[in-house]
Amino acid sequence: MPRQMAGGPNDNDRRDSRRGAILVVVLVAFAMAAVLMVLAVRQVGLERQSQQANLRREQSRWLAEAGVERATARLAADPKYSGETWTVSAKDLAADRGGSVRIDVRAVSKQPKRREVRVFADWPDEPTWRCRSVKQVFVDLDRVASVRSNVAKKTTEP
């Protein structure tokens, strides 16, 4: 049987076969890397959306707190205060969007010196991304009046 010489047709077939296998391995590796990159970018996007939602919730909570403080101050000045809708500008919030706060004040039945204060805070004002926080407190008008008179005494004293 004749012997094949080095570099004959069988060696070329083996080299081509190895090159083809290496090419397939490289293409699979690139495909896996591309899939991992897409998943990483998607994860970053989801994380960003989650952080923005947390920011909206937190901002609306702070607006609700401010609404309670505002209602308490207004009740101290005028026990007949019944509420308002307060539009807060982006500049006042040091943010890129403004918000709104609706304050409802109602008398508590059988307790003429108490008021129920409900605050509905929306941030941002834009309906698509709006987050609402609701806060309800009860305000004792006698306590508010005593705080008001103490503040007045402190500001008038020398």
Image (tube, helix red, strand yellow):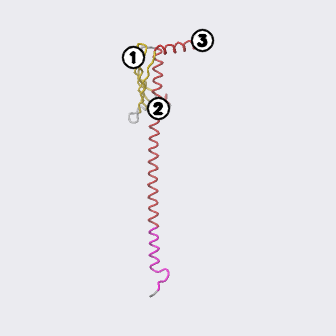
Q: What is the crowding at mark 3: few (fewer than 14 residues within 10 Å), some, or many (at least 20)?
A: few
Q: Quadrant of the C terminus?
A: top right
Query: Which quadrant of the figure has residue 127?
Result: top left
Image vertical order of residue 78 relative to residue 88, above or below: above
The residue where tag 1 is placed is: 108
The residue where tag 3 is placed is: 157
- How much space separates mark 1 and mark 3, taking CA atoms? 36 Å
Q: Residue furthest front?
A: 110
Q: What is the crowding at mark 2: few (fewer than 14 residues within 10 Å), some, or many (at least 20)?
A: many
Labelled disc at residue 52: none
Magenta span includes 55: no
Q: Earlier in the sequence, mark 1 or mark 3?
A: 1
As helix, strand or loop, the secondary structure at mark 3 comes to loop
- How much space separates mark 2 and mark 3, taking CA atoms? 38 Å
- The residue at 49%/83% (across/down) is 5
Mark 1 or mark 3, which is nearer to you?
A: 1
The three-letter code of the residue at mark 2 reads Gln
Q: Which residues make up the magenta segment?
A: 3-21
Q: Position of residue 90 (x, y in %)?
A: 47, 30
As helix, strand or loop, the secondary structure at mark 1 comes to strand
The residue where tag 2 is placed is: 59
As helix, strand or loop, the secondary structure at mark 2 comes to helix
Image vertical order of residue 79 relative to residue 37, above or below: above
